[in-house]
């Protein structure tokens, strides 16, 4: 059985902590490990589980690779989507990868950003589902509802056995309808988790959404593989329409079955959902970071840096980051995505990037910026290096504050230790490397007429990046 982890979501409802370039699946929201890492960890103990296939946005490929490296996991493939086209094409690409070796191999499709508290119950449900999948069924996992939720789709299933025939899928209902669903006992929350053979999924996709499969096959035939990644041609893949597994296949096939799952599942689709799975104090509050509350109840208060204090408020969500603060009523947290939409319309950076931006070699954080100069804190991981590059519009000063830097500047190469500095004139070929065993920290002062990240002419890059960014 091959785990297929879908890691392409943007997590807009958890803004400002989740951003386009660093969404919720890469964040440690409920513990020390990230959501992606927890998804992989809960597979430990399942029999005959092979190396995972990860499907992610190409912008996140190095985040995926680094988080797998931290766990000591080698992926079978990390498939880079040029742009998100929902789950049906993403799973088709993974199925095409599996079909090249063993088309009958079962694939366990899991979103990377779910919480499952009872891992034993989850694994038991997977073991129940595997026989049906091997016989050709398309298995979905239906969450046993504990309340009338309006934020989830529902599955109506027949019978009361461990594996039940799916009768229909239902869209997110209003509250009155959701209450009827839960009272009937025939309806389950749609988890978005599946188990089926690669060949069976491709057959059903060809039957019910042949246009999607045609584009995915054309894309797969023109793929390129480098290092840990499978790179897809943008010009081909962008012709694929966006659709979910549910719409494209599961609602149309006559082979859909459901395994009930009661395991403390939550898709962390909002700040209130995160509050529901976290530990609360005696007043029903979840407090994270440097937080002081007075006469505050049933609230989620999170600080990523500065002190956050609340007085006399109830049922609110307050999330502080270095460049944005969210304040919302608990009943309105689903509307946070509208804030993100509005910020994108205003062409703001906050929907896309944190102040700290992560790169395959480390990270950088902008400390100060004006029209003519910018100050950054740069961290380079041990053994990592930036690209060999030059800038047309800016010069740079580098000051090492921790670790050792190897600097290439024009024709010369030299080392810098702590409290040492160097100057990179405009138009000079240069590279920064960390030859040491501890992270390299330096302060970079840029000065010039234009300070955008696209003022990079890259001559050599060990990460195979095509664009000019970072």
Image (cartoon, grey):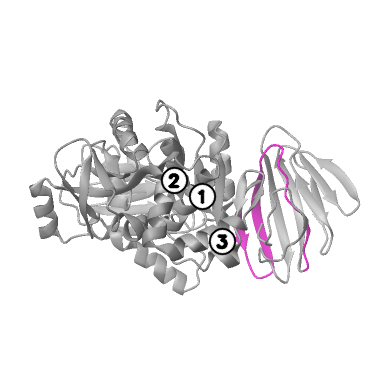
376 or 211: which is nearer to us?
211
Counting other residues with Cα less than 10 Å from the Cα at mark 3, is it few (<14), some (14-19), or many (20 or more)? some
Per the image, the residue denoted by label 3 is: 218
Give the CA distance from mark 3 to mark 1.
Answer: 11 Å
Marks 2 and 3, the one that precedes in the sequence: 2
29 or 463: which is nearer to us?
463
The picture places residue 48, in percent across and down from the top left corner, at: 44, 28
Extent of the magenta region: 366-392
The picture places residue 32, in percent across and down from the top left corner, at: 44, 35
Whether residues under marks 1 and 2 lie with C-beta atoms below 8 angstroms apart, the answer is yes
Quarter of the view holding residue 168: bottom left
Per the image, the residue denoted by label 1 is: 96
Q: Residue at x 47, y 74 (%)?
A: 346
**Location of the N terminus (image quadrant):** top left
Asked if residue 120 can be seen in this view, the reply is yes
Quarter of the view holding residue 65: top right
44 or 284: which is nearer to us?
44
């Amino acid at each position: 059985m091959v785990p297929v982890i879908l890691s392409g979501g943007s997590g807009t409802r958890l803004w400002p902590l989740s951003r386009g370039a660093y969404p919720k699946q890469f964040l440690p929201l409920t513990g020390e490990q990230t959501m992606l890492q927890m998804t992989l960890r809960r597979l430990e103990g399942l029999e005959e589980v092979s190396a995972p296939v990860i499907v992610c946005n190409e912008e996140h490929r190095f985040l995926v690779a680094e988080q797998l490296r931290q766990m000591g996991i080698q992926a079978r493939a990390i498939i880079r989507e040029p742009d998100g086209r929902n789950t049906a094409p993403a799973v088709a690409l993974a199925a095409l990868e599996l079909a090249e070796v063993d088309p009958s191999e079962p694939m366990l499709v899991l979103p990377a950003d779910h919480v499952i508290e009872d891992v034993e119950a989850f694994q038991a449900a997977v073991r129940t589902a595997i026989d049906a999948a091997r016989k050709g069924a398309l298995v979905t996992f239906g969450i046993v509802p504990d309340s009338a939720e309006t934020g989830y789709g529902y599955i109506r299933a027949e019978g009361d056995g461990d594996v039940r025939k799916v009768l229909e899928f239902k869209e997110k209902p209003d509250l009155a309808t959701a209450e009827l669903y839960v009272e009937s006992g025939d309806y389950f929350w749609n988890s978005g988790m599946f188990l089926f053979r690669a060949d069976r999924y491709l057959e059903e996709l060809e039957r019910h959404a042949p246009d999607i499969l045609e584009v995915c096959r054309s894309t797969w035939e023109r793929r390129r593989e480098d290092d840990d990644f499978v790179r897809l041609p943008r010009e081909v893949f962008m012709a694929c329409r966006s659709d979910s597994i549910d719409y494209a296949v599961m609602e149309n096939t006559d082979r859909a079955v459901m395994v009930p799952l009661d395991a403390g599942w939550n898709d962390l689709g909002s700040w209130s959902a995160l509050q529901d799975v976290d530990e609360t104090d005696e007043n029903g509050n979840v407090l994270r970071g440097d937080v002081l509350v007075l006469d505050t109840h049933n609230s989620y208060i999170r600080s990523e840096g500065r002190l956050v204090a609340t007085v006399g408020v109830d049922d609110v969500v307050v999330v502080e980051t270095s460049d944005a603060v969210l304040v919302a009523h608990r009943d309105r947290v689903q509307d946070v995505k509208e804030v993100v939409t509005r910020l994108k319309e205003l062409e703001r950076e906050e929907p896309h990037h944190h102040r700290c931006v992560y790169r395959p070699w480390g990270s950088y954080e902008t400390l100060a910026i004006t029209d003519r100069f910018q100050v950054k804190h740069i961290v380079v991981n041990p053994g990592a290096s930036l690209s060999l590059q030059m800038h047309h519009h800016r010069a740079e000063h580098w000051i090492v504050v921790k670790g050792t830097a190897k600097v290439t500047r024009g024709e010369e190469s030299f080392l810098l230790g702590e409290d040492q500095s160097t100057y990179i004139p405009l138009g000079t070929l240069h590279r920064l490397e960390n030859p040491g065993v501890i992270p390299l920290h330096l302060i970079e002062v840029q000065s010039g007429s234009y300070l955008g990240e696209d003022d990079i002419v890259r001559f050599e890059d060990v990460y195979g990046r095509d664009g000019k960014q970072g």
